[in-house]
Amino acid sequence: MTLRTIEPAQHTAARVIGFLYLFQMATAVFGQSYVRDQMIVRGDPTKTAQNISGAERLFRLSIAGDLVTYTAVIVLTWALYVLLRPVDKNLALLAAFFRLAETAVLCVATVNSLVVLRLLSGADSLKTFEARQLHSLATLALSAQGFGMSVGFILLGLGSTVFAYLLLKSRYVPRAMAAWGIFSSLLLAIGTLAILVFPGLGAVGLAYMMPMGIYEVGLGLWLLVKGIQAPSVA
Amino acid sequence: MSTAVMTERIAEASPRSKARTAGFFWLMTILTGGFAMFAGVSVVVSGDAAATAANILAHEPLFRLGIATNLVSTACYLAATLLVYDLLKPVNRNVSLLAAFFSLAGCATGALSFVFQLAPLAVLGGGEYLSVFTIEQRRALAYLSLRVNAQASIISFEFFGLHCFLIGCLILRSTFLPRLVGVLMTLAGLGWLTSSLANLLSPPFARYLSYYIVVPGALGELSLTIWLLLVGVNVPRWNEQAGAAAEWRSHP
């Protein structure tokens, strides 16, 4: 089997994946947790609008941060494809397609942040709305962004499931780690879908995403530090 | 023609005709994209939502044609992406694939941003359910949507920038295309990338930059387009590099 020999490109890809899993986690946490979650006040569109207008530069920085994240995800997807192509070319391509679709969806979700900036810009053309109407439209755009991200997360979960399955099959990394990847990716996809259908489930908060976070950081560290090993002859 | 047959035809085509076709599709991308931009921008009266709305309704066929042309432009860019990917595969198939991935992301984002160009038609077209808003409010929403469309397409330029940049790098390392075109393409790509990020961070700074970006951007893309269309690639050298790549892959 060709699987026993690892091409040099695969070793490079493994290190790139390791670095990018950590990098995209850091930029994603900056955009979402550090900036947006701090600015958005639930149930108070006016306070939210004031927070964003008061720190427009930071809000813009989070939009740019999102794009950096998505760019990193594209490179990550590519590196995963290069790493796992020898295992199963077609499945690796399928997984890459899921993740490319994810980045496109997430980019469009981010456009909502541009809508928010425009609504709160104080442009003359918007004077026909009362301030509180603009604030509630801005909050509406922010929640549309949230829904867009949910759609992206479903695609992320599906793509990541397939990649994790290929990792399991390849034995490049410990099998338990790959199995955890399948579990956490499926949980992300199914959990996000379930919350879209039954919003009440949203009460669990981000708990169902934690396994995925652990997987991405864990796999990232592993690949960055240890790289991949040729599977022992079975 | 089925996709399988079409893919086979593309795979079988000689590198020169592939290059010519790629040049044709890239040129179509520029021309249709240019027209779409003209059609989209010509209705906008800066800062005046009422005049903009009146323009859209008065020139609705042109406005719709602009949106349709935008989609044609995206389709042409996808075709050019596939052909250029194939053409540059002998240089480095992995990097060529990454370039194509960036282009796919850019095309998808760009195409979805056209929705914001369609929205004004829905908001201004007199749907009964919209009567709870005043006509001024509807015009303001239509104007907002157009401005957002312009911003959203800027996002796709980040990815197109990365696509052009990688293509430039691949051309620099190729033996079958002129290095100058490679240099111009990397500059074009870096330019799109810079202007895209500058637009998000500080629109006034981006406006200041725009002249310095558009010129190298146009120069890079036009040089590649014209070269591919008129000259194609150096076929013996292309075959040589493709052969070397295949041999290297089978005996790493």
Image: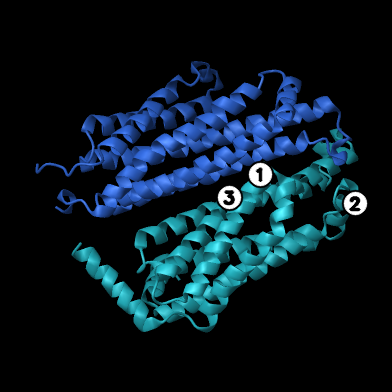
| Residue A73 to residue B80: above or below | above
Scheme by which the image is coloured: by chain
Residue type pointed to by label 2:
Ala
**The C terminus of chain B lies in which quarter of the figure?**
bottom left
**Which chain letter goes with mark 1?**
B
Q: What's the mark number on residue B51?
A: 2
- Residue A98 position by quadrant: top left
| Residue B74 to residue A193: above or below | below
* Image location (x, y in percent) of residue B89: 37, 66
Q: Residue at x 15, y 49 (%)?
A: A4
Dot placed on the residue nearer the N-terminal end, 3 or 1: 3
Q: A74 and B216: which one is in front?
A: B216
Q: Which chain is cyan?
A: B
> Are dots 3 and 1 on a single chain?
yes
Residue type pointed to by label 1:
Leu
Q: Residue at x 55, y 25 (%)?
A: A33
Closer to the camera: disc 1 or disc 2?
1
Q: Which residue is mark 3?
A: B109
Q: Which residue is mark 1?
A: B200
Closer to the camera: disc 3 or disc 1?
1
Q: Is residue B2 visible?
A: no
Q: Colour of chain A?
A: blue
Question: Gap between marks 2 and 3, in whole Å?
Answer: 29 Å
**Element carrying mark 2:** helix
